[in-house]
Image: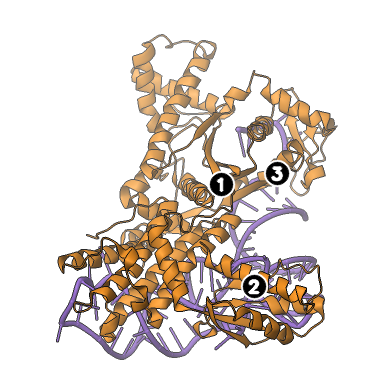
Chain colours: A orange, B purple
RNA sequence: GCACCCGUAGCUCAGCUGGAUAGAGUACCUGACUACGAAUCAGGGGGUCAGAGGUUCGAAUCCUCUCGGGUGCACCA
């Protein structure tokens, strides 16, 4: 049930009727007709712009169309009054029974808010995909939280979602990892080692070194890379992926697929993807122009194998093979996305860190080329996270080892706070994360505000039970006993939920869910406090059990929607605060 | 030099495929608990939506340019 969609459908029906009457010309496009909640409550419950968007093409004044439309609309018994306002808005006031229907729908229909927007379409959401060279840090955390919430949101909106992690275990960085593990291995054998050549000095590798010693004894001591590199690389990436899985568990993230880059090599799959592009005439040998501006010091013209990504909106063509014939990192990425298309996904989403911004166009170009423009790829970039402690910026440095890890963050503030806070911002806006503020249990901390609303509802319900009021079956509550303006406003807010879900899902913007939940909680806290001034608005009416049941039905519905919303964000709702 | 993202109240940020008088929080000021959690609520002041043009019934939103900030820019992933 989506009340806004229902009313919009009714408006379209009325417009069709006006067309049949000959009032409107045939063949009009009603696509721009919208139904929105008005910003100002005095403008009624819903507003439509129908008259204004049609005025020009029809050649009539907006108010003339509005009047004709209003005449049709008032015939609908859900609509109690229609008012023409401003330049031609139609403001609708809905019958109180409509809001009762919303509350009932929330309580009785587990699918309230869910949408068939996705229509079961297969959607692949790839996120995190951090290199398997160490545990996840704060930057990864944002992408993790965002991608996970987005995936849940899309599933809620009716898509068949696959959550996927691409393991970059095929490039030079895993060789570096292997050498670093080897150094720790030597160290475990009592040797003094130094970390040079960009090897990873992180302490998290100490255990990997020790474990390797347990596994192979001293077999690799004093041996050259040709003996141990392959083995240690596999050993190291497995160890690092185990750490990363621990981090994902800590945040409550469950991936459906871990896809290995390495699995693409030596199996002909990269070649197959490139062959596909070649058949489309998009692969050629050529030499790129030097970049404008600052020239790299060792620049020299080189002939490479290039992908004609400029045919699909990229700025320059991109190399897929190095001059020595080896694949660039782009080639396996092409093959990986080719595989996603081959697996039958209708749409792809990649969640990257902001430092991959320059990679977006070529990836989109590749997917467009491989799928003949059929499979859309949306790339969401998550901006940087700035950490603060005691109001001071908390600098991260890989070298100094003051890198904040996901596990430290979650241990400090908990997964729920981490998730909610990172979702109260658009993905493409930088994010401040202040340790002191987010651990505070106050209005500064929206997650507690929302949780508090939910806890309040359950507190009331507990109290009602103590009073001996039966709240086990609220479906028979007489909701006409809770029709104060403030109570109807609460129900109206609930009616927006399915609409918010659709807007958020269409835009791939999970932060809208977080903001809506905050608004909904605010509405509940407000209604609660109205009870201070107006005793008839208190939820528990000792001398009026039917009214109490109606009011509890209303706020119970609020807690249900909060549960759904927090569920999308990956946060567990609470019934009690402590 | 080029590309992408961003610029909204003192501060941190929302703002729906273009809609009505641009909204929250925070800070500041004034009020509200003999009810179920005051971890809350109500009210007030605070804006050239970076700037300038353009598109139209209507622009914070779309287009162009300028200014300011971030990120990335051939055989690194």
Disc 2 designates what residue?
Answer: A11
Residue appearing at x 55%, y 11% in the figure: A226
On residue A434, the disc is: none
Q: Please give the name of the residue rendered at 65% of the width and 42% of the height, measured from the top-left corner.
A: A346
- Image mark 3: chain: A
Q: Secondary structure at mark 3?
A: helix
Q: Look at 74% across and 36% down and name the residue there.
A: A370
Up-down relation of residue A102 to residue A24 (above or below): above
* Secondary structure under the numbered disc 1 in the rendered image: loop
**Chain identity of mark 2:** A
Q: Quadrant of the C terminus of chain A?
A: bottom left
Callout in the foreground (2, 3): 2
Viewer can see residue A482: no
Q: CA distance from mark 2 to mark 3?
A: 38 Å
Q: First in sequence, mark 2 or 3: give its number.
A: 2
Q: Which is more foreground, mark 3 or mark 1?
A: 1
Residue A364: assigned label: 3
Q: Position of residue A544 (x, y in %)?
A: 23, 78
Q: Is residue B70 left or right of residue A323?
A: left
Q: Residues within 10 Å of mark 2 (few under 14, many from 20)?
A: many
Separation (CA) of disc 3 from disc 1: 21 Å
Give coordinates of residue A260: x percent, y percent: 55, 28
In the rendered image, which residue does mark 1 sit on?
Answer: A159
Circle 2 — which element?
helix
Q: Is residue A388 left or right of residue A552?
A: right
Q: Is residue B15 above or below residue A327?
A: below
Q: Position of residue A48 (x, y in %)?
A: 63, 76
- On the image, the x and y values in percent for residue A28 come to 78, 69
Kindly identify which chain the residue marked by label 1 belongs to: A
Nearer to me, A117 or B67: A117
């Amino acid at each position: 049930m989506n009340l806004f969609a229902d009313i919009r459908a009714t408006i379209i029906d009325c417009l069709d009727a006006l067309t049949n009457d000959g009032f409107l010309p045939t063949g009009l496009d009603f696509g721009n007709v919208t139904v929105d909640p008005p910003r100002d409550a005095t403008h009624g419950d819903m507003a439509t712009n129908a008259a204004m968007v049609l005025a020009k093409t029809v050649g009539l004044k907006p108010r003339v169309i509005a009047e004709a439309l209003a005449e049709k609309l008032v015939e609908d018994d859900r609509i109690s009054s229609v008012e023409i306002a401003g330049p031609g808005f139609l403001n609708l006031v809905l019958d109180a029974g409509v809001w009762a229907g919303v509350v009932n729908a929330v309580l009785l229909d587990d699918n309230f808010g869910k949408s068939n927007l996705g229509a079961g379409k297969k959607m692949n959401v790839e996120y995190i995909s951090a290199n398997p060279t160490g545990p996840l840090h704060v930057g990864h955390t944002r992408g993790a939280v965002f991608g996970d919430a987005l995936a849940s949101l899309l599933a809620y909106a009716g898509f068949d979602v696959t959550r996927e992690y691409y393991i970059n275990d095929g490039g030079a960085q895993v060789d570096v990892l292997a050498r670093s593990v080897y150094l720790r291995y030597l160290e475990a054998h009592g040797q003094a080692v130094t970390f040079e050549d960009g090897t990873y000095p992180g302490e998290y590798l100490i255990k990997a070194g020790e474990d390797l010693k347990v596994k192979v004894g001293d077999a690799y001591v004093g041996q050259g890379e040709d003996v141990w590199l392959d083995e240690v690389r596999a050993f190291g990436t497995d160890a690092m992926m185990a750490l990363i899985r621990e981090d994902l568990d800590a945040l409550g993230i469950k991936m459906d697929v871990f896809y290995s880059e390495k699995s693409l090599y030596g199996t002909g799959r990269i070649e197959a993807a490139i062959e596909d592009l070649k058949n489309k005439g998009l692969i050629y040998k050529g030499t790129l122009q030097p970049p404008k501006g600052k020239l790299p010091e060792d620049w020299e013209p080189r002939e490479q194998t290039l992908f004609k990504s400029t045919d699909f909106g990229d700025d320059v063509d991109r190399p897929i093979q190095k001059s020595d014939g080896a694949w660039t990192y782009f080639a396996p990425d092409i093959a990986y996305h080719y595989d996603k298309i081959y697996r039958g996904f209708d749409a792809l989403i990649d969640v990257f860190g902001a430092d991959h911004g320059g990679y977006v166009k070529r990836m989109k170009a590749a997917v467009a080329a491989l799928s003949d423009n059929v499979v859309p790829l949306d790339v969401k970039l998550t901006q940087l996270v700035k950490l603060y402690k005691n109001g001071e910026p908390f600098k991260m440095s890989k070298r100094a080892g003051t890198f904040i890890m996901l596990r430290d963050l979650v241990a400090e503030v908990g997964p729920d706070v981490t998730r909610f806070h990172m979702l109260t911002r658009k993905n493409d806006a930088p994010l401040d994360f202040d340790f002191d503020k987010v651990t505070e249990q106050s209005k500064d901390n929206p997650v507690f505000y929302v949780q508090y609303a939910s806890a309040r509802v359950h507190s009331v319900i507990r109290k009602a039970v103590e009073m001996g009021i039966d709240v086990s079956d609220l479906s028979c509550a007489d909701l006409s006993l809770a029709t104060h303006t403030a109570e109807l406003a609460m129900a109206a807010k609930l009616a927006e939920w399915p609409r918010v879900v659709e807007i958020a899902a269409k835009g791939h913007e999970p932060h809208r869910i977080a903001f809506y939940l905050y608004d909904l909680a605010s509405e509940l806290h407000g209604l609660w406090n109205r009870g201070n001034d107006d005793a008839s608005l208190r939820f528990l009416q000792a001398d009026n059990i039917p009214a109490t049941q109606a009011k509890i039905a209303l706020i119970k519905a609020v807690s249900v929607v909060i549960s759904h919303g927090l569920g999308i964000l990956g946060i567990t709702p609470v019934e009690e605060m402590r």
